[in-house]
Amino acid sequence: MEASFKLDNSCSKETRYQTFLEQFAPLIQNEKEEISVLANTSAALKEAFGFFWVGFYLIRDGQLVLGPFQGSVACYRIRKGRGVCGTAWEQQTTQVVPDVDQFPGHIACSSLSRSEIVVPIITRGEVKGVLDIDSDRLNSFDETDRVYLEKLVNLLTDTLY
């Protein structure tokens, strides 16, 4: 199975996300191996959107632990309530951060990261982890990203959990 997730950049962001989700759903359909699915998800998002950093942190032993990702090296562990990822976990809500330098307690795994979106992965009221995406530009993420990345995470939870 070879799937290409390169998208036409001349389309609107919403159209690109819609196309991505149509291609992505069959990729993960019926696959239950969490690490494999999250690894392919990271790769597909990076290929489709060219994000600076995209990956997952998974809850293990009461903290977020680095999972599959695409991009430069990252922090291994994040405590609940710390940084953007820990805040998304604690509040169980998506965090859209236009300027990470303005976010109280931001964890700078890379000094090149300028904006960030983190979507918690929640199933049956329990947070399993987070999808974390960083940009090297300010104000990269908006309501469109939030809506469609939450749809992506819903596809993941429906498939995996």
Image (tube, helix red, strand yellow):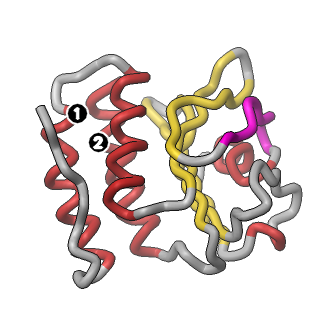
Residue at disc 1, secondary structure? helix
Label 2 crowding class (10 Å Cα cut-off): few <14, some 14-19, many 20+? Answer: some
Reply yes or no: does residue 157 show up in magenta: no
Please name the amino acid that badge 1 sits on: Ile
Foreground mark, 1 or 2, reads 1
Residue at image coords 33%, 25%: 160
Please name the amino acid that badge 2 sits on: Leu
Q: Which residue is mark 2?
A: 155
Task: Answer left or right for 21 relative to 85.
Answer: left
State yes or no: discs 1 and 2 in contact (Cβ < 8 Å). yes
Q: Quadrant of the C terminus?
A: top left
Reply yes or no: does residue 79 show up in magenta: yes
Task: Answer left or right for 80 relative to 18.
Answer: right
Q: Which mark is residue 13?
A: none
Task: Answer left or right for 160 relative to 116.
Answer: left
What residue span does the magenta drawing correspond to?
Answer: 73-81
Residue at image coords 82%, 51%: 107
Q: CA distance from mark 1 to mark 2?
A: 9 Å
Where is 133 relative to 128, above or below?
Answer: below
Residue at disc 2, secondary structure? helix
| Circle nearer the N terminus (1, 2) | 1
Q: Position of residue 79 (x, y in %)?
A: 80, 34
Q: Which residue is mark 1?
A: 28
Q: Quadrant of the N terminus?
A: top left
Return the residue nearer the eye: 19 or 120. Answer: 19
Q: Position of residue 137 (x, y in %)?
A: 62, 76
Q: Position of residue 9 (x, y in %)?
A: 28, 77
Q: In this figure, what is the number of numbered marks?
A: 2
Return the residue nearer the eye: 92 or 65. Answer: 65
Q: Quadrant of residue 56?
A: top right
Residue at image coords 28%, 65%: 17
